[in-house]
Amino acid sequence: VFLETLKRQGKLEESLQLLQTLEDVTLSTKSTMAQPGTIPLSIRQIRELKAELLIQMDRHNDAAEMYEVLITEYVDQWSYWIAYLDCINQSSHAEEAVSRTEELRTKVVDSLSDAPSNSIPRGPHLLSVELAAVGIRGIVNTATSSSSPEITTTTVAAQEVDEEKAIALQKEIRAYGELFSTRASCAFSDLFPYLEVLSGASKDVLLSLLEWSNSIRSELCSEKYAQADGSDDASLKERKARLRGYIFAVKVSYKVVEMLGSNEDDLVGWQELATEWKVATALSSTAKEESENSENSEVQKENQPGDDLILLAVQQLLFRFPKDKAMLVVAATLAEAGIEHSPYNAYLKITAMDVYSRCNATSRAWELYQKMTIKHIQLDSCSYLILPLLVDGGLYNESVLESNHVVKLHGSTAKDTGEYMARAMEQGTLSKANEFLLFQRERMNTSLSLLDAKGRIMDCAPLVHFGTKTRGAPKPIAAQHGIVGAETDLERAANMVKETHNHYGAPSILTSPVLSRSVDHYRDNRDLTIISHQILNQNRIVSKDQIVSESKRRGHVHGFLIRSVLCVDACKGPKKGKVQKSSDTLKDRCNSLIDAANSAETF
């Protein structure tokens, strides 16, 4: 709290001195944590805070030295490398930043020359790719970046790339792939943003990269592997490594084909991918048998070896045959086979949901979504996967049900926030109390998913079927909600007007503040990383602008309907052939209706 107070007061020098004292005391006691009675920070955390403070004080050279200390101890922490590069760039220029960073990288790699081959860190080698990319798109300011390479780099729009620089980047990509494609499953994710940088490169550069990836795939396919060894009794570890390399090569080829445009002839056949997956299932069963025979082993409950092959095969089918019903059935069959073999893989279920939505089999997509057991805060970040499909597929009851879950989540979170803040303050953790407050105010109250859910409830509520009356006779649609031209419209309209003041009530989208807010007001909490496995075929995701625009449209439409009902109620019929005098209530409601019509027209 004391450290945070100093920072809030702008006393950065005093904060830096405090951290230096903590570091000296901790090092003198030969401990990795600060002593009791002081701020509970590890040496690593202290040095990270010191580097951040030095950056705020524009002492970038000193910050670079601090990151160099951290890098020598944690060579695989990607955010340190990027922060070091950025600090040097801020204090000098890009050429010197690249030169000094390369010197540090070489020094670190040389110090790791005696390390076992199975424990080579990715960070220093990925940095070579980053430095090659700097020549094309410049240095990205990522002083506060995360530890994931694919997050810290940025995607650039396709633009003409210098041929020499493109070739240099391509060589570094190939070097990294050859070193880590069989070692790390995330090798393609590491290289993905750098492949994007090459999107504006010449066709020759991209074709060379495609030829390289196809050669790796041909070398590591199961047929070539069996021929080379004469038997299938190779070690499990080596077979998995070859499978990782094969999947890496296919993903690279997919990305290159996507950058080249539609060139289906360069894609590996989906039949080959299905065959390779069939071979890979043996690795899964072997792993399961080993885990059953070992008390210390744990069964992998997320992905099985070869799951990516099914994802890649289905992607290709959707890319090549987006409207071919027969091939969509093949894609659904492959997805179901993958789910049966690897029931805990959420990516397979998400892919299958997309396939079934294209086949107009939304009921099956809904079943798969329910099996993913999405709950709590995941409702706010993952409900976008199913809500549009439910409406398009005519599952209005399910759409209202899932939307209600999102709304209830936000209502309960708002209530819990105050309680958690009070607990944090009682325990003296004021920073946590502030985090709860900011989370509720900046992420939840302005949630894009909440806005979308409320709009869908308003649209679908009149279409909901509410079960049965006596003796199994079903209640008609719109038996309980919605403006449908029935005698119950007035009561329903009055109830919705009352609910407009409840932020967690669906009718709140009818209010003027909601209808006048800009797109920037809303926070997009959707987790789009769960569809990051898609390369060729991108999932049909509604943009933030579209969601806000559609929600406002719903607000205008339903607001107009409610005002119309209230106007009709305030009208009085002629009495003895004479038109009745307008009441003040009728005038107010008519003016409100006219204003709503003008607002809708402007929208």
Image: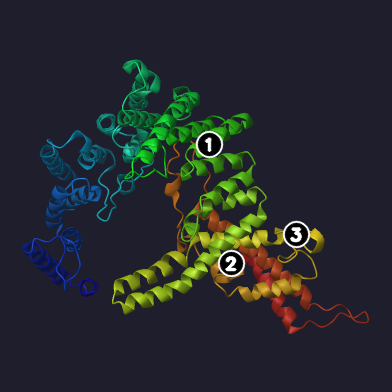
Q: Is residue 185 above or below residue 380?
A: above
The quadrant in which residue 357 appears is top right
Depth check, mark 1 against mark 3: the one in front is: 1
Disc 2/disc 3 C-alpha distance (Å): 23 Å
Q: Do callouts 2 and 3 mark residues in contact (Cβ within 8 Å)?
A: no
Q: What amino acid is at disc 1?
A: Ala
Which residue is identified by label 2?
509
Which label is found at residue 477?
3
Give left or right: position of 562 versus 281: right
Q: Residue at x 18, y 61 (%)?
A: 42
Disc 2 residue crowd, few under 14, some 14–19, many 20+, Cα 10 Å: many
Give left or right: position of 561 versus 470: left
Q: Residue at x 14, y 68 (%)?
A: 35
Quadrant including the C terminus: bottom right
Quadrant including the N terminus: bottom left
Depth check, mark 2 against mark 3: the one in front is: 3
Mark 1: which secondary structure? helix
The quadrant in which residue 66 appears is bottom left
Viewer-closest of 231 and 485: 231
Which residue occupies the extreme left position in the image?
28
Question: x%, y% of residue 90?
Answer: 19, 53
Viewer-closest of 417 and 225: 225
